[in-house]
Amino acid sequence: MTESEELLAQADQLLRHGSSDAGGWWPRTAAFLIRAALELELRAFWDRAEPGTEGAPMRAQLLVLATRTPPGAGTARDVAAAWHALSRACHHHPYELAPTAAELRAWHADVAGLSSALRVRNTAEYVYGTAGS
């Protein structure tokens, strides 16, 4: 199990059972775990596709990702949307509610799918020798 899969599994535990230890903070904790899993997958993607890119600010990584994924697939757009939504959910705003379990479950499913898409995309490039072209 990869590190990002472990984080998603921990977020899944929170979504299934909540946590008395986390009190009312479990939704934001789950959002942090899901966002961290996405960031780890992006780091692994860049390690294989463009070493050094993983050190760039996340906004820059998300812009460059659009040039490294197929135009019609929407992977880069979906990764950016998930990351921005999760980042917003991670921050406490006094007049906003925490994310709902349904929102978190949807983001969890999105990140699990995007993680697979990033791994498949990257593997296909190197198997077929199209990396860097």
Image (cartoon, rainbow, N blue to C red):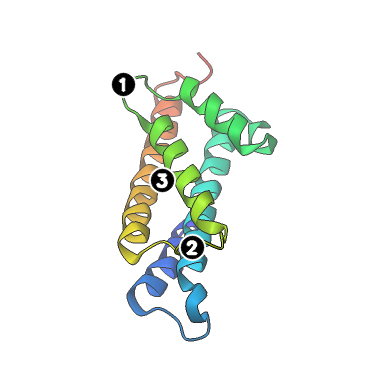
Whole-angstrom CA distance, mark 3 to mark 1, is 18 Å
Report the residue marked by disc 2. 7
How would you rate the neighbour count of disc 3 (Cα within 10 Å): few for under 14, some for 14-19, many for 20 or more? Answer: many
Report the residue marked by disc 3. 115
72 left or right, relative to 3: left
66 left or right, relative to 92: left
> What residue lies at 66% left-to-right and 36% top-to-bottom?
57
Q: Secondary structure at mark 1?
A: loop
Could you tell me residue 22's position as x and y percent? Answer: 52, 79
The quarter holding residue 47 reads: top right
Whole-angstrom CA distance, mark 2 to mark 1, is 29 Å
Which mark is in front, 3 or 1? 1
Circle 2: residue type? Leu
Report the residue marked by disc 1. 72
The quarter holding residue 105 reads: bottom left
Which is nearer the eye, 22 or 74? 22
| Label 2–label 1 contact, CB within 8 A | no
| Label 2–label 3 contact, CB within 8 A | no
Which is nearer the eye, 47 or 38? 38
> What residue lies at 53% left-to-right and 60% top-to-bottom?
32
Instruction: Please identify the quadrant where the N terminus is shown.
Output: bottom left
